[in-house]
Amino acid sequence: MALNLSSIVRFLFRRKAVENEIDSELTFHMDRQTEENIRRGMSPAQARLAARRTVGGIDQIKEECRDARIGQMVETTLQDVRYGLRVLRKNPGFTFMAIVTLALGIGVNTAIFSVVYGVLLRPLPYQQGGQLVVLHQQAKRANLLNVPFSAKEVFDYRDHNHTLESVVEHHTMTFLLLGKDSAERVQTAVVSANFFDVLGVRPLLGRTFVASDEAHDANAVLVLSYKYWETRHGGDPNIVGHVFQMNNRPHTVIGVLPSIPQYPSESDVYMPTSQCPTRSSAGFIANRQARMMTVFGRLKPGVPLVQAQADLSAIGHQMSDAYPDAYPKAYGYGIAATPLQEDLTRRARTTFLILLGAAGLVLLIACANVANLFLARLLKLERELAVRTALGASKARLVRQLLTESVLLSAIGGALGLALAPATVSLLVKFAERFTTRSAEVRIDGPVLLFTLLISLGTGILFGLAPAFASRRQVTDALKQATGRTTASRGRQRLRAGLVLAQVAISFMLLIGAGLTIRSFLKLQEVNPGFNPDRVLTMRLTANFTRHSQLAQLLTLSKDILRGVRTTGGVESAALTSNVPLSRRAIASGPGSTGFQIEGKPVSKGELAPLVDTTAVSDGYFETLRQPLLSGRTFTSRDDEKALNVAVINQTLARHRWRSEDPVGRRISFDNGASWIKIVGVIGDAKEYGLDQPIGDEVYVPVAQFGFAGNLVLRTALEPAAVAPMVRAALHDVDPQLAVDQVDTVEQLKEESVASPRVTAILLGLFALLALVVSASGIAAVMALSVTQRTNELGIRMALGAPRQSILYMVIRQGLALAIGGTAVGVVGALVLTRLLSTLLYATSPEDPLTFIAVSALFLSVATIASFIPARQVTAIDPLVALRQE
Amino acid sequence: MAKPKSDLLQGTLDLLILKTLDLEPMHGWGISQRIQQVSDSVLQVNQGSLYPALHRLEEKQWISANWGASENNRQAKYYELTRLGRKQLTQETENWERLSGAVARVLGTA
C-alpha cells in the first residue's frame, strides 16, 4: 500500500471534520431519498421511514466508511508494532544484544554530535555572527601568523577601509581590583566603546559602553562578565553603581554581560581603551610598532569576505610603503581576514571531526552487527515467512513488518543512547574547553535530538532493509523443506560474509587510528622536558603597579619576595620568572620572537634579523628547575641593574648561531647595537611551550636587569601542597597588596599540557575497543550459525571418516578468511584515512609500521578466538544424530 | 420492486461506480439512482456498501471528492474520476469483459 501521508494526517488531525462530512453526506442521501419517495406519492412520514429502510443502519455505514478512510496504514502499523514487540520479547538474547549495541553506538554519536554542533556548527550567539571577521596581521616570511596591532594600525584599518561597517580592538591586561576583602587580580579586557554594539550583545543589567566613556577625561567605568559577576559577586542584582579602586582611580560598575562565550578570551571585567594606563599613554599611541591589540570588524551587508580581504590588503600595502621601518620587507607583512566562527573553533575542528567520524564508524559496525543478527533470525523464520507469502501476504507487507521490527529496536536503542549521552557530554565539554570558549554552548537541544532521531531511524532502516532485501526467496523451495531446515541462499551468505568483512575492515581502521594516537601519546609522555618538574611549585604574583611604578621599587620588591620565600620552611630554592614552563599561558601564546643582533654580524637594513624568545629569570632559576648548565655560569644575585648586562642562552641557540664555537663571552644586542649584552652561559634545552613543540632559540636575561617577573617557582623539600600556604603567608608579610593566584605544581602543568592528546587517545581507544568487541562477536555469531546450518554436511563428512580435528580447522579457516579479507581491506582504508590524523600525531608517522603490525596481530588473534568458540561445537556433533535429522 | 434483485459480485460495485462517474461528477445518491435506472432496477445498490466503497476509492485516489451545490441547491459531496481512476476503469472493464465472456462461454457449452 502506498504511503498515503495526507490520509494519515487527515486521520490524526481532522478526525472530527471527516466524521462531520460523513454525517452530512448520509443526511443528504436520506433527504433525497425521502423527496424521491414523496414524489412517488408517499406521505412525508412514510417517505422518511422508507428512506431510512433502504439506507439501513447509519452507524454501521459510518463505521465502514471510517475503516475505509483510516486506511490499513495506521491499523497495520499498529499490528506490526504489536507483532514486533512480541517477537522482540520472545528473543531476549537477540533483543538485548541488539539494543545494547545500538544504545552504545547511538549514545556515543549523540554525545559527540552535541559537542560538534555546539562548538562548530551552531550559529554564533552574536547578532548576525556570520558577518563578524577577525583581522590577523601577518609577517609570513618571519613565520608570524598572528602579529598584534598597534594603535596606529588600528586607526589606519578602521579609517581607510570601504568594506567593514565597523572595526573594534581588544586586548587584555591584569589589574588589581581593590574594594573587596582582599586585593583581587582581575583579567581585564580593554575594548573600543562600540565593542558590544558590533557584537550585538545587550547587557543583562545596566548598560554597555557609549562613545563618551572612551573620552580622555571621562569617569572610569566597568562592565562585568556574567561568570565573574556570578562567581565573585554572588550575582548581586544591585552591583550597578558599585565603585571599585583600580589603577589608583575609582571605577564604577555600569553593567553586567549576559552569559555568552567571550571572544577572544574569557575576561572578568571590561573597560574602554581610555582607561588602560598603557593603551592610553601618548607614547604608546604614537608608536606604530607598539603592537598589543586584537582587531575585528563587521562586514558591511552584502560584502563578501574576499572583497574585504582585498580592501584590507590594499591598506596594508599602503602602510608598508609609507613606513618601511615599521614593516621591514624581509618580514613579508600582510593582513588576513577570517570569519570569527572559524577563528573561534579552528583548534577544535580536526579533533572533533575525527572523533565524530570515529563514532560514526562505530555506529556503522553496530549496524552491521545487528543486521547480521537479523539475518540469522530471519533464517529461522524462513518457513513462517514462506507460509505467510503462500497465504497471500505481499512481499511489501513482509518487508514492512521486518522494518517495523528493526526501527522499533533502533528506537529503543536510541532512547537508551540518549539517556547515556548527558554523562558523556559533560566529560566532553571539559575536554572541549581546552580548544575553544564555545564549549560553554554545548547542550542537548532540538538539533541534537533531531540528529539522534534521524540516526536512530536511519540505522533501523539500514539494518532492517539489508536483510529484508536479501530474503528474495522461492516460496516453494522454503515450503519443500519439510524439516524446517533450509540451506542459506547464496546471496544471503554473501551478504553476511560481506557484512562481517566490512565490520572487520572498519574496526581495523579504528584500531589503527587509536593505535597511532596512543603511540603518539606515549611518545609525548616520554619526552624529556629538559628540567625536573618534581616538587616544583609555581604561583603567579601581581604587584600593585601603581605603588611600584619605579624600576627601583620593583627590584626591591623582587628581592624582598625572594628573601621572604627562601627563608620559609619547606622551600629548598626559589626564583622568579616571566614564563612558567608548560603553563597554560605559555602553551597558548607560544614562544615570542624578538629580533636581535650578534656582535660582528650586523643585520643590513630590510634583512630579517635573527629571532629569539626571551625570558627574564632571577638567580637560582636554573638551579630550582634543575636545568643543566653546559658551559659558563648561571645568574647570581650580583647580576643586577648596576652590573654588566648579561644573558644565558639555550643549547639550540648556541648550535644555531655559533655552531662549534663557544658563545660564552660573545655579545648580542636587542637594540641595533645601542647596548650590548654579554653571554655568560649555555644552558640545556627546555620544553617550555609544550612537550610536542620543537625547541626554539631562547635567551634568558636576569630579572634584576629587566624589571619584574610575576611568577614564582619553588622547589620544595616536602609535598608542594603542604608548603603552598606557608609561602602565601610569607608573601603576605612581604606586601599585603600582592595578589597570588594560579598555584600549581609544574608536574600538574606537565600532565595538563598533554591532557587533550590523552583524552583523544582514550576516546579513540574506547571506540576501537568497542568496535573490536562488536566485530569479534559478529564473527562468532556468523561462524556459529554456519556451523548449525552445516550440521548435516559436517555429519556426513565425519561419517565418511573426516577427523574432527580437520573439520575444526576447516571451520576456523573459514572465520580467519573473513578476518584476513577484512584486515586487507582495512589496511588499505587505514592508509588513506590515517592521513587525516597526522596533525594530531606527535613524532608518529600515520603509516607507522609497528602500529600496523601490532594491530593486525591483535586483530587476527581475536578473530581466531572468535571463530574457535563456535567451531568447538563441531566436536560435539554426533554423526548419527546429525544424519538422522534428515 | 417486482424484478428479481442480483447480488453484486465483490469488486463489481467499484467498477460500476467508476463507470458511472466516467460520464460526469456525481454525488452518492445520484450514483445509486443512476445505477438503478441504467440497470433497469436489476442492480440495487445497497447504501451500506455504496458509501464505504466511495470512501475506499477516494483513499486509493481513484476518485476525488468536492463539496458543491446539488440540483436542488443543497450542499452535496460530489465525486469525480481521477486520472488514476480512469486508468483503473479501462483495466477493470477489460477484466470484466474477459471474465463475463469466459463465464458466457462456459454456460454456452455446458
Image (cartoon, rainbow, N blue to C red):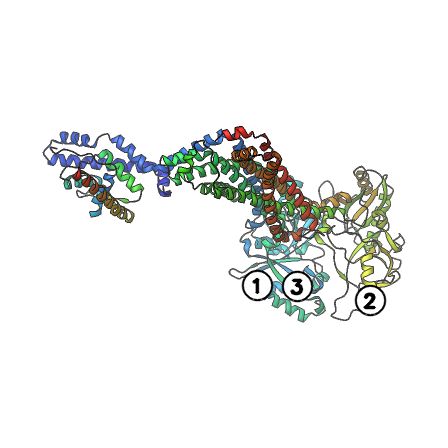
Distance of label 2 from label 1 (alpha carbons): 41 Å
Distance of label 3 from label 1 (alpha carbons): 17 Å
Q: Is residue A654 visible?
A: yes
| B24 vs A337, nearest the viewer | B24
Label located before the other in sequence (3 or 2):
3
Other residues around mark 2 within 10 Å, as few (<14) / some (14–19) / many (≥20): some
The quarter holding residue A801 reads top right
Query: What chain does badge 3 belong to?
Result: A
Question: Where is residue A810 shown, x and y percent of the image?
Answer: 59, 39
Vertical side of A329 occupied by A773: above or below: above
Residue to which mark 2 is pinned: A673
Name the element at disc 2. Answer: loop
| A589 vs A319, nearest the viewer | A589
Distance of label 3 from label 2 (alpha carbons): 27 Å
Three-letter code for the amino acid on which mark 1 is drawn: Ala
The disc label shown at residue A153, or none: 3
| A346 vs A859, nearest the viewer | A859
Three-letter code for the amino acid on which mark 2 is drawn: Gly
Q: Is residue A517 left or right of residue A456?
A: right
Q: Is residue A799 left or right of residue A834?
A: left
Asked whether the beta carbons under mark 3 and mark 2 sit within 8 Å of each other, the answer is no
- Is disc 3 in the same subunit as disc 1? yes
The quarter holding residue A77 reads top left
Label located before the other in sequence (2 or 1):
1
Q: Nearer the viewer's eye, disc 3 or disc 1?
A: 1
Query: What chain does badge 2 belong to?
Result: A
Residue to which mark 1 is pinned: A308
